[in-house]
Amino acid sequence: MTTLPSPIESGGELDQRLAEKLGGNYGVYESFNTMNLLMFASILVTFLLVGMIWFQFRRARDQIGGGSMFGFSRSPAKRYQQGDEPVTFKDVAGLESVKEDLAEVVDFLKHPKKFERLGARIPKGILMCGPPGTGKTLLARAIAGEADVSFYSINASEFIQMFVGVGASRVRDMFDVARANAPAILFIDEIDAVGRLRGTGIGGGNDEREQTLNQILSEMDGFATNDVVIVIAATNRPDVLDPALLRPGRFDRQVMVSRPAQKGRLQLFEVHTRKVPLASDVNMERLASMTTGLTGADIRNIVNEAALWACRGNKDNVSMSDFYYAIDKVLMGAKREEVISEEEKRATAYHEAGHTLIAWLTPGRDRISKVSIIPRGKTLGVTQLIPEEDRVSISQKEIEGKLLISLGGREAERLVFNELSAGAEGDLEYVTQLAQKMVTAWGMSERIGPAAFRVGDEHPFLGKEMSTQRNFSDKTAQIIDEEIMRILNHASEVTAEMLAENRNKLDALAQALEIREELDEAQIEQILGPPKYRRKEEKPSEKNEGKTGGNKDEKEGTS
């Protein structure tokens, strides 16, 4: 049976021929026309798409009061909600002066009439400046926990989008919402993302970042005297901010959040170990003295690493040995499993022995905590030095001592093997920068005298350093180069003489390092005798306060 589609006309010539050939074994059926169905479906889909777009447009318009589609111009600032355990000033260790300044802000928000009675006006903006990890964001959260007011937090990079004008509209929306919910606090983190110096971009002042900054400036100027809205910003680059941000009437007050001192580090360890079960041998004061120069974030990381290491050992509490391991891991990096050859191990041992011996023979306020030739991080060995006390200044004699210590590894290799290696690359970079500052910034060169010269382009991304001419002549530049080389060559000669005079101590220390791989201060003293840096009033029983530790800015090593 054969069935043919409808184009064959019944009773026609073709139909008759097929009937003659096939007899009655065929039929003709009417085919279904799909054109009408396809046309109807396309019209329906078109109406659905138009309806969805219109619905989205109406919803976006209702949400932002007639703004752009999909809410691009709305502020992404998040309102802080008090949790079960809000962060307060009690959770911020140290930084007492900073907390006093911010507590004044909280008091003003709670009791504005108390200040208005005497005609006092709280600053419109407060800028918190400090190195990364010192607790600026934590302080902002503590303000939210202390003040029973609206608190909005945003990162400055969230203002910038690919569409021109979006950042400015978001700033307007953010300030409008804050005014509507006054008293309120606006916290802008990393404000240098939009607050950098204007006039350095390609757009000549018309780019998105500068428009956003201009809007922030105008909004802060537009605060009425009765607007109880305070802007708190945080940055670790205050030197790149536009001067218009820092003038009175905008960010009136700058609060420096610096690295914690001994007392602050002790409080940080106490705060971060509240929920950590500690063994009886944990000495908080010793840990605080071993972590000179570290920030609150570093200390929190050390406590966490110590707890993780104790968990690996299936311990019931965290002991002092766990903290020693955590400090080594944070400061020097994790141990590498690679095995170095005996020749490289011997060269590394003499390199680190050279650093250690010079540091042992050089008077100063830094003491050796540990020397190791175990590969960690990017280094094959490291000599750790920690300051005996917190300080913010350094003398020329101490700088010259640092030069000798840093060149000790290179000169030890040349003395023993009569050749140099690439392991001193980091040491040479360090001493060159130090000598350059001695000549150009600190006035420690007799030929140059009491003068300061700009040598490096510290902020080329600002666009202003590339066009700034140096403030000294070619002749002065030649003298600067000669003085830097004179200082480094003299330090190298002095270091070589000291190592040659104490060759037996250098060999003994290197051999001990090859065998033990790590030596602490007490073990080094058994080989070399009492160090020159030890204070005269220090008792022998106090000579080994800690077995490990160090300062990121002070440690020496080879890579």
Image (tube, rainbow, N blue to C red):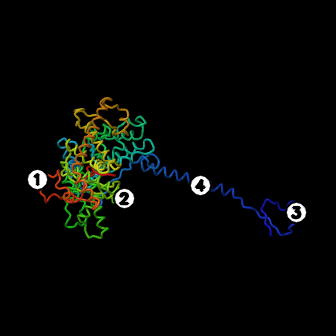
Residue furthest left in the image: 537
Q: Which residue is mark 2?
A: 341
Q: Which residue is mark 1?
A: 537
Residue in front for this viewpoint, 92 or 438: 438
Q: Which mark is residue 45?
A: 4
Mark nearer the viewer, 4 or 3? 3
Measuring from the top left, give residue 117's x and y in whole percent: 18, 43
Decide: few, some or many residues near mark 3? Use Cα within 10 Å; few <14, some 14-19, many ≥20.
few
Mark nearer the viewer, 2 or 1? 2
Measuring from the top left, give residue 348's x and y in whole percent: 31, 54
Determine whether label 4 and label 2 are within 8 Å by CB: no
Label 1, label 3: how many angstroms apart (C-alpha)? 129 Å
Amino acid type at circle 3 is Arg
Label 2, label 1: how many angstroms apart (C-alpha)? 44 Å
Determine whether label 1 and label 4 are within 8 Å by CB: no
Query: Which circle's residue, 4 or 2, is located before the other in the chain?
Result: 4
Instruction: Identify which residue is drawn at 69% across, 58% down.
Output: 34
Q: Which residue is mark 3?
A: 17
Query: Which circle's residue, 4 or 3, is located before the other in the chain?
Result: 3
Measuring from the top left, give residue 151's x and y in whole percent: 30, 51
Label 1, label 4: how many angstroms apart (C-alpha)? 90 Å
Query: Which circle's residue, 1 or 3, is located before the other in the chain?
Result: 3
Q: Quadrant of the N terminus?
A: bottom right
Decide: few, some or many residues near mark 4? Use Cα within 10 Å; few <14, some 14-19, many ≥20.
few
Mark nearer the viewer, 1 or 4? 1
Query: Which circle's residue, 1 or 4, is located before the other in the chain?
Result: 4
Question: Element at badge 4?
Answer: helix
Amino acid type at circle 2 is Ser
Residue in front for this viewpoint, 102 or 538: 538
Mark nearer the viewer, 4 or 2? 2
Instruction: Identify which residue is drawn at 25% across, 44% down.
Output: 403
Residue in front for this viewpoint, 467 or 162: 467
